[in-house]
Amino acid sequence: MSQEKIIEVKNLSKKFGSFTAVDNISFDVYKGEIFGFLGANGAGKTTAMKMLIGISRPTSGEVTVAGYDVKTAAEMVKKSIGYMSQRFSMYDDLTIKENITFFGGIYGLSRNKIKEKTAQLVSELGLEDAVDKLVGDLPLGWKQKLSFSVALLHEPKIVFLDEPTGGVDPITRRQFWEMIYAEAHKGTTIFVTTHYMDEAEYCDRVSIMVEGHIEALDTPKNLKQQFNVESMNDVFLKLARNVE
Amino acid sequence: MRTILFIIQKEFRQIFRNKAMLPIIFVLPFIQLLILSNAASFEVKNIQFSYIDNDHSAASRELISKFQSSDYFKIIGNFESKKEANLQMEKGKVDVILEIPNHFERNLLTEKKTTLSVSINAIDGAAAGVENVYITQIIASFNQKIQSELYQYNDNSFVQPQNIVTIPSFWYNNTLNYKTLMVPGILVLLVTMLTLFLSAMNIVREKEIGTLEQINVTPIKKHQFIIGKLFPFWVLGLMILTVGLLIARIVFNIPILGNIGLIYLFTSVYLLVILGIGLFISNYTETQQQAMFIAWFFTVIFILMSGLFTPIESMPTWAQQLTLFNPIRYFVEIIRMVMLKGATFSDISRPFFIIAIYAFIINGFAVWSYKKTN
Ligand SMILES: Nc1ncnc2c1ncn2[C@@H]1O[C@H](COP(=O)(O)OP(=O)(O)OP(=O)(O)O)[C@@H](O)[C@H]1O
Ligand SMILES: [Mg+2]
């Protein structure tokens, strides 16, 4: 893996009134890695991610993504990234094809390119028969795979996934991670949050966030060694206990 | 530009996929025009009419008999003095007092002109306006040379309205057919409300379902999003106008005396104001419910102060000045002028430019308040 930094975060904080959701965090993400961003409910993962992708203004701190300062060049950052939100956010009242056309279109893809991408994407997902179905009628697992693919339409350098596998069965989760691997293999940097500790094992490096702070950051292997436990789940539990 | 087209395409797909949309465009205008134009009729009957005849001449008796033979007036008697009559008006027993001066007949014959004094109970401004028209018409049909001095009883005192001429909005509607007057106005409400509500709710809905956030992480430009989002509703507004005009013409037989192109020209600029307000509302609300409340708040005020139901001339001065900020007021004024009076562009140029400036300002604010980053 390269040591080229693609995301640099320095002393980043976000306050909502007197409540500090993200408290002075600093970390780097390297090009091409799968970076797991872990934390319990309400730890501040989504809040931090929104600042990295330029839709939420930091209270303080510096963020550089793909070489651009989020504060001054948010629109350049947006060209370089894909984002899959924690909430499913495609149009339920549009078909698969129409959704792809729309998102491809606003990312500036040509009509031909969109056609090509649509064909490629539906065949990869095995959705050939469903292209003209409303997205609202799809099962959740399909929807999530679809949003992942749509987030990659414009071939971004980095893709941000906020709990991409929330609420789906283990088999679908497995398939989803295969898609993530395949994408990482192409050189795309993956920044992913999750609640599932087994998924943490799939990441190159993970950070564990507790109440707005980053309490640990390393490879799963090193973390398990450091805490002298067998699984990432135990690492997580130990950390949570330390904080209490 | 291409980006904008993609948004417009998506928006039209969603609008017409929505099963409620076609009835909203075609059925709603019809029902609303039908019900409101009948219900909101200003026809005032059984006006309690009294008079003071200081002349006791053939002419004065003939004038009074004109009122007697009218369906609208109910003669409740004559008074000996103005004081007595005013007392009855204060009690609410009479709506109108007509005072015929001494030498009414003689002045009419020798000097070819005379004055009458008319007092109207203007507690109900709308009714007073209508009564004023009736009275003026009856007097005019009796003799063109009579000048009537109008007094309104309001807030426990008699005041002479600044505007002695009859409320102008009634002038050109010779037959006093209220449907003719109401239908164009209701058409204005329809176009305004539908475009305002649909546009404001549409953008907030994207906030609610999270797609707006998804759009905000794309490199799309603010103006591309806003134009793409609002253009379909601009088209929708013009479609509703068209449907409404057709219904007005075919079903209600409302004349369109002026150039219909003027109505479209004005409406296309007017809709920018309304869409700007819609965008503005959606920028400051998080849920469709909130957007709905705020949109209602504005429409109710705008409608009540539009001169549609209460003539602007019979509002207190401060309220009259407030109506200058009300876009609906200008639309009501213009659509009536063009449809019923055959106004030309130079007649409507002032309100037209006011609305154009309005559109600039409101959209400036709306674009400024739309934020891709929170
Ligand atoms: N707009 C906001 N205003 C006020 N508080 C907020 C806002 N957004 C988030 N918070 C608070 O900040 C904290 C962190 O929220 P965040 O959504 O970042 O957590 P998370 O780690 O993503 O949790 P989850 O795993 O449940 O998604 C929570 O306590 C949340 O209530
Ligand atoms: Mg979250």
Image (cartoon, coloured by chain):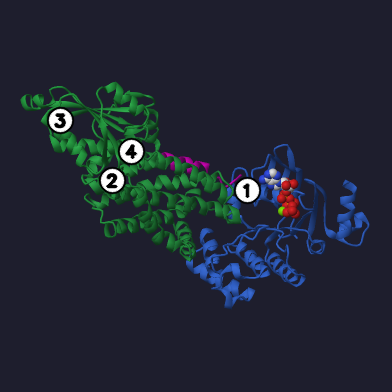
Look at 49% across and 42% down and name the residue there.
Answer: B297
Q: Are marks 2 and 1 in contact (CB under 8 Å)?
A: no
Nearer the observer, B15 or B250:
B250
Looking at the image, is B155 positioned above or below residue A27? above
Residue type pointed to by label 1: Gly
Residue B312 picture quarter: top left
Residue contact at pointers 1 and 3, CB within 8 angstroms: no
Image coordinates for residue A119, horizontal then vertical, percent: 56, 74
User: As shown in the figure, which amino acid type bears the numbered disc 3?
Assistant: Ser
Which labelled disc corresponds to residue A54? 1
Residue B35 placement (x, y as % from top left):
38, 54
For chain A, what colour was chosen?
blue
- Quadrant assignment, res A185: bottom right
List x then y, in percent, for residue A18. 73, 37
- Label 4 SS: helix
Mark 4 on the same chain as mark 3 = yes
Q: CA distance from mark 4 to mark 3?
A: 26 Å
Residue beneath disc 3: B60
Distance from label 1 to label 4 (Cα)?
59 Å
**Foreground: disc 3 or disc 2:** 3
- Residue named by callout 4: B127
Of badges 2 and 1, the one in the foreground is 2
**How packed is label 1: few (under 14 Cα within 10 Å), some, or many (20 or more)?**
many
Q: Which residue is mark 2?
A: B336
Residue at 92 percent of width and 59 percent of height:
A229
Q: Which residues are magenta?
A: B360-374
Q: Is the residue under label 4 in contact with that under label 1 (CB below 8 Å)?
A: no
Viewer-nearest residue: B148 or A47: B148
